[in-house]
Image (cartoon, rainbow, N blue to C red):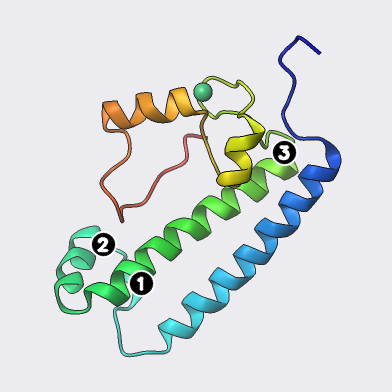
Amino acid sequence: MSSKKTGLNKTQLRRMRGDLLERQHWLLNESRGKMDGPEVDDTHGDEADLANSALHTELAIDARARESREIQLVTGALQKMDRGTYGQCSECRDPIPVARLKALPFAEYCIDCQEELEREGAFAQQGDEIRFLD
Ligand SMILES: [Zn+2]
């Protein structure tokens, strides 16, 4: 009981996976629906272009950017589940606390590392893509 153990048990993990799959499905449908509109085409995905377009359709773009970032995160989390590394900090390899995973099922890092990385500016500003380290 005293040693640090991986936070999630199998049942929790399965439930989490279900939630993530559902979320991923929803997000993919959501962004596909929006792509039908006469908005920005995604093919050149340039951040500067996105920023410029955001001036014109900022709300839509903002939502799109957040969604595509979330899709990446959710997909990354699902990949980690497949690899059996879900719930493990990508930086220090410590288990991410269950409470954190419940609040943020696609958390990549433990709170310490997240804060550290944010301080170092590893994450670009809001709306930017978060790149996976592995
Ligand atoms: Zn960490």
Determine whether 91 is above or below 54 in the image: above
Residue at the (77%, 44%) spot, across then down: 13
* Label 1, label 3: how far apart the Cα atoms are: 30 Å
Whether the residues at callouts 1 and 3 have beta carbons within 8 Å, the answer is no
> Which residue has dot 2 on it?
46
Image check: 106 left or right of 84? Answer: left
> Which residue has dot 3 on it?
83
- Foreground residue among 103 and 110: 103
Indicate the position of residue 73 as horizontal and vertical percent values.
52, 51
Mark sitting on residue 88: none
Q: Residues within 10 Å of mark 2 (few under 14, many from 20)?
A: few
Task: Kindly indicate the quadrant of the structure image that contains residue 84.
Answer: top right
> Which residue has dot 1 on it?
43
Indicate the position of residue 104 as horizontal and vertical percent values.
55, 46
* Label 2, label 3: how far apart the Cα atoms are: 30 Å
Residue type at the position of mark 3: Arg
Indicate the position of residue 26 as horizontal and vertical percent values.
60, 72
Residue at the (48%, 28%) spot, across then down: 111
**Disc 1 versus disc 3: nearer the observer:** 3
Image check: 29 left or right of 15? Answer: left
